Image (cartoon, rainbow, N blue to C red):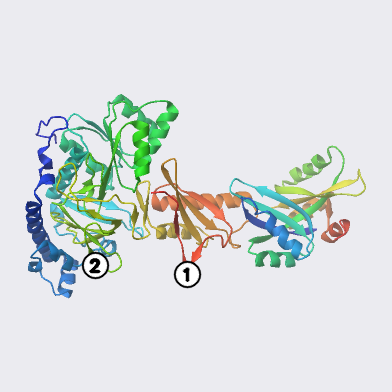
Amino acid sequence: MKSQWNDAPGGFHPASAPDFLPRAQLQALQLGRLQAIVARAYERVPHFRDRMIARGLGPTDVRSLADVARLPFTVKADLRDTYPFGLFASPMEEVVRLHASSGTTGKPIVVAYTEADVQVWTSVMVRSFVACGLHKGDVIQNAYGYGLFTGGLGAHYGAEGLGATVIPISGGNTERQLMVLQDFGVTAICCTPSYFVHLVEKAKEAGIGFGKLKVGVFGAEPWSEGMRERIEAETGIKAYDIYGLSEIIGPGVGIECQQQAGPHIFEDHFFPEIIDPVSGAPLPDGAEGELVLTTLSKQAMPMIRYRTRDITSIYAEPCGCGRTIRRIRRIGRRSDDMFIIRGVNVFPSQVETALLKVEGTLPHYQIVLTREKGLDSMEVQVEVTPEFFSDKIRALESLQHKLADAVEHVLGIRVKVTLVEPRTLARSEGKAKRVVDKRQI
Amino acid sequence: MKIRQLSLFLENRPGQLRVPFKVLGEAGIDVLTMSLADTQQFGILRLVVKDWERAKKVLEAAGSVVNITDVIALDVPDRPGGLAGVLESFDELGLGIEYMYAFAASRERGSHATLLVRLEDPDAAIRQLGSAGVKLVPADELFKRVGA
């Protein structure tokens, strides 16, 4: 799917036209799409219809964009409760792709795309790449994982849609990544920021440079300005923050432009609101709160007022790049206890489930997140109890391995498990503090 | 023949080792011998005291995780090759040693040294070693030797 546009390097790309719509025109477009999507969800998704009826609302009650605040929220639990296909608004024969992300209870969250949805996704990814200065002729190393995770295929089709050359290398295998980066004339890379920092370190150890690399498109986990500065200073590339989540579409909900001043949200497809995470009340531009997104065009699985749990604010001021679509402040934290480590969503309860599976362990545990040399790491500290304390070193070491294996089995990533003395873990008001995040974001 | 040994789980960080000794000292419990096994992340402190039950109680009250294990005490001729000879009996009997450490040397130099040995099945080992002529030391005698 090569681009039909023979766009000049760095020039305007027609796909990006909606980024520059006059606000009034954009809002008219948004309202029309919002009304249509609410009607679609009302007709086809019983879960949503029931909630609308409970509030005395019908699809025709959306008369202005402000009316969005009257609509019921959708939360992650709704996707779990209706697993796997309960929120679909299209019959399966119209669904061309399924993706899934990790959930809290072992069951993933399933998301669906019609052909039109995939096209929208591709278009917002094209616009994402354009926003950070990429174009036909760029060679993009896509080191996001390919598979059920939306990162790999989302970036892949976007890069192809742009007309760039895509290297679908997927995640992992650092040595091969570095070889390809050097030998294939790579100009841009897509991966998690922590993985890129890891690549930078390995490249330094091996005494190799970054060849033609000029742009990094980094997302799927929170990262800081400090990390950006470090990446840019050490490699000479420009590092851009891309925002997205599977429930909405995957990567490409928003991205930073070359001003690097917070991700622009592709508002013609994703309607952003900021709410008070406690009361649910809408907050004005500039105020910090939870980001809520409504998909304005998604056919297979419309998300109405989806609570992202991401804490941010909307920048009302126009951006120096000329885009009229608004920006959000870069995401630094989430309103619930889910955390993201190396691009994988982790809930403490998953760790608990894993620990419980190991015979003889009583799950007094704490998860400690640290960031060393830019790479996130997770340590599970498990309290030793008399029940499973053995006098033999190798029995304890074997227990440690079993625990690490069990956690790896559930999360898919290897983490450090440490045995600690009892009562060494902080307790607060009867509720154990499960996660200690020492990362400086 | 069996000696009750206390094992304590310790996190491998400064100051952790002092705590149990302080607790035992305050309770007036004399530590007769000890051994410390360590890994990168944690350590196991093994102690022999006369009144192990009281020691366990005070240590647990202070928050330690305590495990009670049986070890056996044996006398080894205090001369070059003495221990090798005893270990030969272990090998012949097919007895695997989990770990061992020194208890104390005898006051009469040149006679014997005493070791504490942890085996998978101490009762079976005591029977087998006894008939193989290895000199095992009962708990009472062991404590008497060090005046406990």
Using the image as rendered, state which of residue A271 and residue B146 is in the foreground: A271
Which of discs 2 and 1 lies nearer the camera? The answer is 2
Please state if B32 lies on the left or on the right of A267 as rendered: right
Q: Is residue B27 above or below residue B126?
A: below
Please state if A269 lies on the left or on the right of A226 as rendered: left
**Subunit under mark 2:** A
Q: Is residue B68 above or below residue A379?
A: below
**Subunit under mark 1:** A
Residue A354 visible: yes
Identify the residue under disc 2. A281
- Measuring from the top left, give residue B68's x and y in whole percent: 69, 61
Disc with the residue nearer the chain's start (2 vs 1): 2
Identify the residue under disc 1. A429
User: What amino acid type should be assigned to the residue bearing mark 2?
Assistant: Ala
Residue drawn at the location 56% of the way across and 56% of the way down: A420
Q: Residue furthest right?
A: B108
Q: Is mark 1 on a helix, strand or loop?
A: loop
Residue B134 visible: no
Q: In this view, does B6 lie above or below B93?
A: below
Between the residue at mark 2 and the residue at mark 1, the CA separation in whole angstroms equals 28 Å
- Crowd band around label 1 with a 10 angstrom C-alpha radius: few (<14), some (14–19), many (20+): few
Residue drawn at the location 66% of the way across and 65% of the way down: B62
User: What amino acid type should be assigned to the residue bearing mark 1?
Assistant: Glu
